[in-house]
Amino acid sequence: MTKNIRISSGALLLGLLIIPPVFAKQYTVEQNNKMFIFNGSAASAINVKQGDEISFKNSDTVFHNIYSISDVMNFNLGAYGGGESASVVFNKVGTVKVKCAIHPRMFIDVKVEN
Ligand SMILES: [Cu+2]
């Protein structure tokens, strides 16, 4: 779906000032067969830039609970079922070890670079 959004130049400038990672990207990491899938393949690590966002999409029929307890950052997306997604913005540089609280064998390292 394409949205046409009109933004005044003043509002656009304000947005640029408020949101530092202007060129932040959005990635999707799926959970499928109780594995983390990126670009169609099982992945144990992904490289992103500071400020990028990852949408963790549950493509399984079971619940997943994506979280991280890392020196770099902590988050807990809570449990969510098949077809649902939840997103995280990676604002700090370093390796964020992401796991699933329900399936201990599921992990992916998000390597956040400057
Ligand atoms: Cu899981």
Image (tube, grey):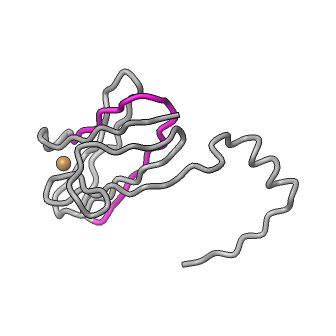
Magenta span: chief secondary structure: strand
Give the percent coordinates (x, y) of residue 27: 43, 55
Question: Is 79 located above or below residue 90 in the figure?
Answer: below
Q: How many marks?
A: 0
At 47% from the left and 38% from the top, the residue drawn is 90
Name the quadrant of the N terminus.
bottom right
Q: Which residues are magenta?
A: 83-100
Residue 34 left/right relative to 15: left
Give the percent coordinates (x, y) of residue 11: 82, 54
Question: Is 17 located above or below residue 58 in the figure?
Answer: above
Question: Is 4 located above or below residue 79 in the figure?
Answer: below
In-front residue for pair 49/96: 49
**Quadrant assignment, res 10:** bottom right
In-front residue for pair 5/42: 42
The reply to whether the magenta stretch includes residue 69 is no
**Quadrant assignment, res 68:** top left
